[in-house]
Structure formats: C-alpha cells, structure tokens
C-alpha cells in the first residue's frame, strides 16, 4: 500500500492544560489546530471537546457545534467525533455529540480497561485549574467502561446514519470483541482497527505486541476485510507509527496521544507532529492519503451526509 492515512487527534481527554501550554482548549484553538493539521497532511481529524473556560473534557454537543461546522467548511478532512469522551463520563454523555451530528466517522472503544495516567501528577506541583489535580490523581481508580451492551448501544445508535468507526483496541481481547460484533452484523466491512499501545491498563508499547496484534487481526478478519492503524502514547508515538507504516498500516498522531515532538521537547502544535509523521511516511517511499483517498479506502458516506 503506497497511501497512508494520517489521523490527527487534536486534544483528547487525558492531558490537562497544566501539562502543556500548546494543548488546544477553546473552540477557536481547536479550529485553528485542526485546519493546520489538515494542511500539514492529516486526512482524518479526531475530535474531543473541552470546557472553553477551564479546559476540562466535556461532552456537550453545543460546544462541538462551535467548531465542527467551521472545520468542515475550511478543510476537506474527514471529521471523526469521539464516543470515548473521557473515562469520567457516562456512555450516554459520551454519545451525545456523535448522535446529534452523525459524522462520517466516530471512535469506538472496544472493551473496558483500567485507564491510568496518575503517574503524570508526580511531575506537577502547581496546577492551572482546580479540577486537574483530582482528575489526574484519581485515574488510579478509573475503569474506562465499554461493556458489550455499551458497544452495541453505540453501534446501533449510529449505524443507521451510515457512520463508520475507528475501532480502538487497547489489547488483544478487544480484537475478539470486534469479531463478536462482526458476527452479530453490527460492524460492516470494510472497517478500521485502531491499535492502541502504551496506555497504562492496556497492551504495552513493545514491538512484539504490535506484530502479535496485527497477526491476530489478520487471523480473525482476513487481510482484505479491514484497514488498520496504530497510535502509541507518549514517547512511543513516533517509533511505533514508523513500525506501523513499515508493516503497511496507517498512523495516528496528535496532542491527545503525546504532548512531545522529541525527547523532552514539547510539540508546539498538532501540525508539527503531522509534518513529522508525513516525513517518516515519505522516507519509506509512500505518500499520505488525501481525504478523498481516505474516504474511498474506509468506505465513508461523505461529508455532505453529516449534520454539521
């Protein structure tokens, strides 16, 4: 495959404003970062929302409405709306924006895991906002709930609108969950597996795990049924996407997944990470896919079929 889909996850729900001054929080910052990431070569923009005043993750569709139409109007990128939200949200709250806007793509976590990022608190002595410290430290007690009933609810709610999914698999067992829903007819071919590495509570960022996840997916689905992509948290981000691209996969970057561009150096923008990923892809003799190519590869319904 000579075309690699680059996804950029703009802000997420794990990192907090204290951790980086470059983390986009307001709708305008999310708009600007998304447009720049698309211009740098991202075909897919993965989007969460934040409280504009405090930077706290939020599921309010009215906040999504302040940036989704503007990004859609100013780029041709595929807009991927989270249904993961944050581990602190209910499943119903996580789904509100996607259900309202019926995007081309949504993320979908394919199983429940312990989701810990509490270690980051050890490096911080002063917090910008009151909510941050408790949110980060209490993640040692987070269960990121994604039961079979939850997953079916999301698939059934959005499936009728033609929305496709970025099936986020944090461990090998999640691949089997995808196979389960494929057998039930709730997942339609072709589909995208987003393999997630390096989250505490999920599979570790070891090369052997990447190979094993890919081999397991091939065995379960057959190589022609699905596309696959890789994201890795923190310092593993760029090394892992390099390996994924070598193996024929797609890649995901963005400040949701890592705040850094190099060892000990904060990324100043999402676009900076996209440019680095595009450079890696091109060094291998491949090219970043355009939004139109990504839509064709992922069999998406097109931006005119969304509600933003």
Image (cartoon, helix red, strand yellow):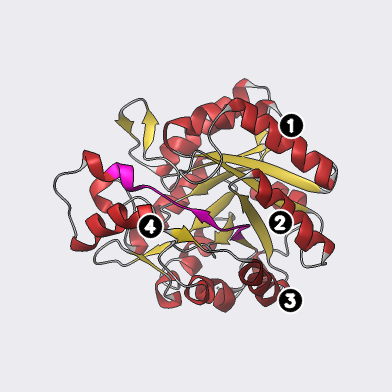
Q: Residue furthest front?
A: 141
The earlier-in-sequence mark between 1 and 2 is 1
The answer, for residue 244, to whether it is visible in the render is: no
The answer, for residue 37, to whether it is visible in the render is: yes
**CA separation, marks 1 and 2?**
29 Å
Mark 3 and mark 1 in contact (Cβ < 8 Å)? no
What percent of the width, then of the height, locates residue 89? 43, 69
The magenta region covers 107-120
Does dot 1 land on a helix, a strand or a loop? Answer: loop
- The residue located at (57%, 59%) in the rendering is 80
The earlier-in-sequence mark between 1 and 3 is 1
**CA separation, marks 3 and 4?**
35 Å
Mark 4 and mark 2 in contact (Cβ < 8 Å)? no
Mark 2, mark 4: which one is toward the viewer?
4
Q: Which residue lies under the disc numbered 2?
A: 177
The earlier-in-sequence mark between 2 and 4 is 4
Mark 1 and mark 4 in contact (Cβ < 8 Å)? no
- The residue located at (76%, 49%) in the rendering is 297
Q: Which residue lies under the disc numbered 1?
A: 2
Mark 2, mark 3: which one is toward the viewer?
2
């Amino acid at each position: 495959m000579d075309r690699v889909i680059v996804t950029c996850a703009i802000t997420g729900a794990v990192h907090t404003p204290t951790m980086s001054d470059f983390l986009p929080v307001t709708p305008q910052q999310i708009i600007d970062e998304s447009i720049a990431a698309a211009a740098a070569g991202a075909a897919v923009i993965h989007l969460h929302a934040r409280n504009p005043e405090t930077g706290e993750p939020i599921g309010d569709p009215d906040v999504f409405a302040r940036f989704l139409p503007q990004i859609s109007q100013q780029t041709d990128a595929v807009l991927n709306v989270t249904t993961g939200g944050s581990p602190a949200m209910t499943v119903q709250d996580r789904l509100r924006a996607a259900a309202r806007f019926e995007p081309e793509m949504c993320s979908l976590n394919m199983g429940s895991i312990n989701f810990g990022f509490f270690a980051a608190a050890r490096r911080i002595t002063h917090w910008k906002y009151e909510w941050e410290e408790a949110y980060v430290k209490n993640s040692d007690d987070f269960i990121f709930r994604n039961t079979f009933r939850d997953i079916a609810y999301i698939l059934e709610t959005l499936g009728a609108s033609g929305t496709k999914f970025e099936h986020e698999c944090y461990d090998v067992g999640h691949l089997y969950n995808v196979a389960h829903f494929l057998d039930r007819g709730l997942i339609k071919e072709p589909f995208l597996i987003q393999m997630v590495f390096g989250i505490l509570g999920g599979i570790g960022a070891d090369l052997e795990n990447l190979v094993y996840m890919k081999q397991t997916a091939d065995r379960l689905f057959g190589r022609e049924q699905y596309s696959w992509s890789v994201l890795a948290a923190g310092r593993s981000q760029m090394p892992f996407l390099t390996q994924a691209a070598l193996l024929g996969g797609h890649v995901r970057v963005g400040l949701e997944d890592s705040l850094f561009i190099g060892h000990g150096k904060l990324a100043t923008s999402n676009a900076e990470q996209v440019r680095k990923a595009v450079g890696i892809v091109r060094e291998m003799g491949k090219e970043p896919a355009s939004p139109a190519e990504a839509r064709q590869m992922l069999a998406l319904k097109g931006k005119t079929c969304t509600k933003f």
